[in-house]
Amino acid sequence: MRRPVLLSLLAATTALGLAFAMPSRAAEEAVVIPAPAMDAAPASGIQTAVIAGGGCFWGVQGVFQHTAGVVNAVSGYAGGTKATADYQTVSTGRTGHAEAVEIKYDPKKISYGKILQIYFSVAHDPTQLNRQGPDTGTQYRSAIFTTSDEQKKVAEAYIAQLNGAKVFSKPIVTKIGALEAFYPAEAYHQDYLTLHPNQPYIAYNDIPKVENLKKLFADNYIEKPTLVSASKATN
């Protein structure tokens, strides 16, 4: 079931005033994986990573908003053109866009490799092709949009490392390509996990991802999320 259909059903349920509960577990389980053998060289200044979590950007944004060293994580679109970078058009699956998250981070506090480790371990299941949980279509593909040759080399080496170690039951299908542009999503998509923690889609698919981040990456977890709304207020 595609997310727009699911959300329509949930809205109808709410309107009827019915109690709606979902099991408290993630649709995709976290996987303990080794850290990357190759990482980006130490750098100064805020760096950018853009990833698509094989599904809705709400959960991926939520995970990295609870990650230490991330100064901003914005939901948006990557892979297509500016003219088609809106939710309704992207949802057709014909724009080339993926629902992605732009992560601005301090490399002195978290490395690019650590971001990828969290991405592959708790943010999504990288073995699902063009889908994640209830979301299906090319807009929900698993993808890494690199901003430099170094990022490309680190990402390629890490996927080869994980596939070689067979830490997943199936091969990783994550696509790697150069970032051409990132387009922030509509305002109502930003900080969605924090603003709607009891929404059934979030409670079932995404809150457990944040719980897994806290459990598996305790040293990288922060309790108070770094929100887009807070970043705008301070700029």
Image (tube, rainbow, N blue to C red):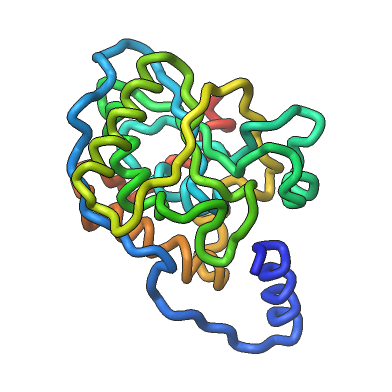
| Residue in the image at 28% along x and 27% along y | 111
Q: Position of residue 97 (x, y in %)?
A: 66, 38
Vertical comparison of 30 with 95: above or below = below
Q: Position of residue 20 (x, y in %)?
A: 58, 84
Q: Is residue 157 above or below residue 23?
A: above
Q: Is residue 204 above or below residue 231?
A: below
Residue at 51 percent of width and 50 percent of height: 54
* Quadrant of image for the N terminus: bottom right
The outermost residue toward the top is 44
Side of 96 relative to 73 (left or right) = right
Q: Nearer the viewer, residue 76 or 2?
A: 2
Residue 171 % position (x, y): 35, 49
Quadrant housing the C terminus? top right
Could you tell me how many numbered marks the image carries?
Answer: 0
The answer to whether 83 is drawn above or below residue 14 in the figure is above
- In percent of the image, x 52 and y 83: which residue is there? 21
Q: Nearer the viewer, residue 44 or 134?
A: 134
- For the point 68% across and 43% down, the residue is 187
Which residue is at the front of the view, 172 or 216? 172
User: In the drawing, does residue 207 fall left or right of residue 76?
Assistant: left
